[in-house]
Amino acid sequence: MRRRIVSLLCFAVFGSALALGQDVRNDREDLRQDRRDLRHDQVDRRQDRRDIRSDRRDVRQDFRNGDYRDARHDQRDIRNDRRDLRSDRRDIRHDRRDKRSDRRDLRRDGRGRG
């Protein structure tokens, strides 16, 4: 009977250690993914700002030339780029929150550097 209890106890300890190791590995991978997403969103945000500046120049040029149809088209592009910019801002905020959560999970597991 003792042997069975000891073997079950050892099995439970080793099983939980393996599960904890897998949890740490998943948290680290999540953290890497969040960092990657954050970098991508920041690059996309810079591109949207560049597009807005370019479209504003085009709108001014179109108004100077009297080409109101192209000016309306460029203004529509500006609205779309601003919407993308807001979406990127939300994504960045979400990715930062996820990064904090993953770091907290790693510290709670007692391993890893967050």
Image (cartoon, helix red, strand yellow):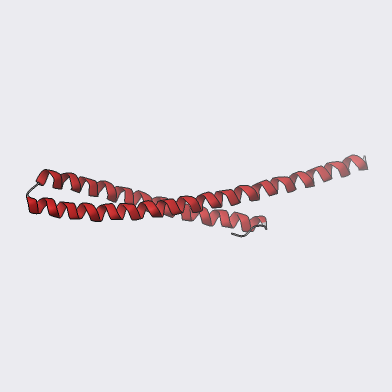
The C terminus, quarter of image: bottom right
Q: In terms of depth relative to the viewer, which is nearer, 86 or 53?
A: 53
Q: Residue at x 69, y 49 (%)?
A: 21
The quarter holding residue 93 reads: bottom left
The N terminus, quarter of image: top right
Q: Position of residue 61 (x, y in %)?
A: 13, 53
Q: Residue at x 8, y 51 (%)?
A: 65
Q: Residue at x 60, y 50 (%)?
A: 27
Q: In terms of depth relative to the viewer, which is nearer, 75 or 110?
A: 75
Count of labels shown? 0
Q: Residue at x 84, y 41 (%)?
A: 8
Q: Position of residue 46 (x, y in %)?
A: 34, 55
Q: Residue furthest left?
A: 66
Q: Is residue 103 left or right of residue 15?
A: left
Q: Is residue 67 left or right of residue 16?
A: left
Q: In terms of depth relative to the viewer, which is nearer, 64 or 6?
A: 64
